[in-house]
Image (cartoon, rainbow, N blue to C red):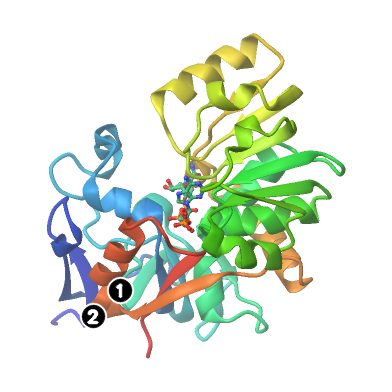
Amino acid sequence: MQAKKMKAIVATGYGSPAVLQLQDVNTPTIKSNEVLVKIHATTVTKADTMMRTGTPYFGRLFTGLRTPKHPIPGTGFAGVVEAVGNQVSSLVVGDAVFGETTLGFSTNAEFVAVPENGVILKKPDSISYTEAAAFTDGHLTSYNFLKEIAQVKPGQKVLINGASGSLGTAAVQLAKYFGAEVTAVCSTRNIGLVKSLGAHHIIDYTKQDFTTTGQTYDVIYDTLGKRSFKECKKVLTEKGQYISPVLQFPLLFQMLWTSRFGRKKAKFAATGLRSDRELREMLQEVIRIVTAGHLKTVIDRQYPLEKVAEAHTYVDAGHKKGNVIINVQP
Ligand SMILES: NC(=O)c1ccc[n+]([C@@H]2O[C@H](COP(=O)([O-])OP(=O)(O)OC[C@H]3O[C@@H](n4cnc5c(N)ncnc54)[C@H](OP(=O)(O)O)[C@@H]3O)[C@@H](O)[C@H]2O)c1
């Protein structure tokens, strides 16, 4: 019997957005422990653009040395369960779900197969597919960094550098929700957006350098890795923490060093490498915070599936506000 076909974006190699092509490929066949999700919405994230270029190069040890091991890009998804394997008990056909495939990628497509015990959760009716598809990028990552890694406490002073991006827009709101006094760093054109998210103080990075204002912070969350631990150290409080989701060798070294010496700490983590169970638990918390009205999902541009390459070009430029969504179902 001929396999059913679906539309998907296929990366024909590592490189510019031109490597991403819309193709007809086989619809995934599910194993007994998997569900087939008909995708309504997926995303193009900054991390997806790094996967596309295959940089930093050591990342190719995981993603494929010469060409991507998983040629269909994308990790975030929201959609409806289309079929279930015969051992699946917690999900049924017709359930609205969302989640992420982490190192399995493959979500810039009409369908994806996901293990029942993978990062997949039921989507509350009050949350749209468009919003839910974005949860596993900024919301999940910033929750991990602020709550789990920095353990932000009420009354602490937290500075978010890169406050208008996917991680930043979530971080401003989450830090405020955790009771911190939030300083957001963004450019002039994003001041209105960042203010609307509840930042207590705003620093326009085109006019002022936050490391020279004389203010100190308990936590500096550098969402874009634009400033180093060394530069930020002087504006950290005595036991302050510099946390960044951007992998750079000096930061890894500083993390190792400060874990043993000195009171000020530097920290990096790869959220997607946490266990599926931990990711699901954090996402449950994210859903709770969103449905309680404390965390909005900032959505910038939306594209249809066939325009994923265009979406990559936009994300590459580095000026997106919040999240970029791919609507797979029109
Ligand atoms: N480790 C992990 O677990 C993990 C997970 C997910 C993502 N990440 C990484 O996290 C990073 C951030 O991703 P993202 O999606 O939040 O980025 P993004 O949305 O692409 O960031 C774009 C935003 O950054 C602002 N910006 C640019 N230069 C700036 C500067 N010098 N200072 C302050 N703001 C600046 C831009 O505003 P203007 O144009 O107005 O300046 C724009 O709004 C990426 O490197 C991604 O790979 C890591």
Image location (x, y in percent) of residue 66: 13, 42
* Above or below 244: residue 89: below
For image coordinates 63% across by 31% down, the residue present is: 212
Image location (x, y in percent) of residue 175: 73, 50
In depth, the one of 38 and 177 nearer the eye is 177
* Above or below 53: residue 190: below
Picture mark count: 2
Q: Amino acid at mark 2?
A: Met
Q: Secondary structure at mark 1?
A: loop
Decide if residue 96 is in sight here: yes
Q: Is residue 256 left or right of residue 265?
A: left
The residue indicated by pointer 1 is 109
Image location (x, y in percent) of residue 25: 17, 74
The residue indicated by pointer 2 is 6
Q: Marks 2 and 1, Cα distance to the nearest angstrom?
A: 7 Å
- Residue farthest front in this picture: 207
Is mark 2 in CB contact (under 8 Å) with mark 1?
yes
In depth, the one of 75 and 201 nearer the eye is 201
Q: Is residue 151 left or right of residue 128?
A: right
Residue 159, quarter of the rendered image:
top right
Foreground disc of the pair 2, 1: 1
For image coordinates 34% across by 55% down, the residue present is: 48
Q: Is residue 296 left or right of residue 74?
A: right
Q: Amino acid at mark 1?
A: Ala
Q: Quadrant of the N terminus?
A: bottom left
Q: Secondary structure at mark 2?
A: strand
